[in-house]
Image (cartoon, rainbow, N blue to C red):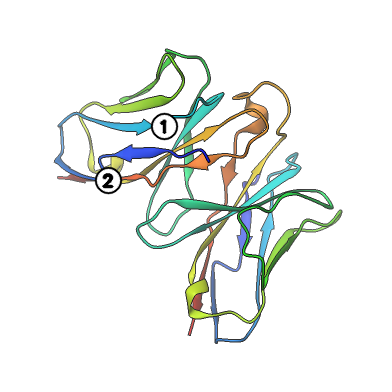
Amino acid sequence: NAGVMQNPRHLVRRRGQEARLRCSPMKGHSHVYWYRQLPEEGLKFMVYLQKENIIDESGMPKERFSAEFPKEGPSILRIQQVVRGDSAAYFCASSRSDTGLPGSSYNEQFFGPGTRLTVL
Amino acid sequence: TQLLEQSPQFLSIQEGENLTVYCNSSSVFSSLQWYRQEPGEGPVLLVTVVTGGEVKKLKRLTFQFGDARKDSSLHITAAQPGDTGLYLCAGASYGQNFVFGPGTRLSVLP
């Protein structure tokens, strides 16, 4: 059973270009979360999605950032017109569900290896 | 806004020593998770605690959830260089997303 997969692992973009980060959740998981991590810092929540629905995007910048989780295919975090401040590690996590008993195995999050975005 | 604090922020110890790191909040969580993250990798889930006062052991690691479910501790016995990494706690409440602490960066020197 493959874990959460993210690609690319490393992405270099010049200012003004677009960055597309992909996340394939674990098999059987229908919930996806995106986080951003700056060097020497913890994880900052960005967005939570279920298939074809954005559930919570309270952590996502209002401009240039968007996320989707289509019925088929991976979840995509898209950053338009990247700036140097977007340079960070972006992690995706998946869980089976957010329902059921809190703390059950259903809402445990499992993380991918991350995509390291560098904006030149 | 729920906030999680972790202490210490940095910890450097010799192999064989014991250590405890802490995760504290003013909020009550329905569950709390501990992760370890190594450089260049994603966080790896170590444990989930859900019951106030709960203690879980994972080999040399002992996790405790506070009685009031606002805090947690992670104790490592006889630390090894392989324990080196960033230890993150994350709390979840009913209907809320996980909130992560800033982490404790542990370095175990051989």
The quadrant holding residue B81 is: top left
Q: Residue at x 62, y 46 (%)?
A: A3
Q: Residue at x 40, y 18 (%)?
A: B66
User: Which mark is on residue B25?
Assistant: 1
Distance of mark 2 from mark 1, alpha carbons? 15 Å
Q: Are marks 2 and 1 in contact (CB under 8 Å)?
A: no
Q: Is residue A70 left or right of residue B30?
A: right
Location of residue A109 in the rendering, given as x and y in whole percent from the top left corner? 59, 39
Location of residue A74 in the rendering, given as x and y in whole percent from the top left corner? 75, 58
Q: Residue at x 63, y 85 (%)?
A: A17
Q: Is residue A10 left or right of residue A49?
A: left
Instruction: Provide the secondary structure element on which disc 1 rests.
Output: loop
Instruction: Provide the secondary structure element on which disc 2 rests.
Output: loop
Q: How many marks?
A: 2
Amino acid carrying mark 2 in the image: Gln
Q: Residue at x 33, y 28 (%)?
A: B74
Residue that label 2 marks = B9
Residue A73, placed above or below residue A28: below
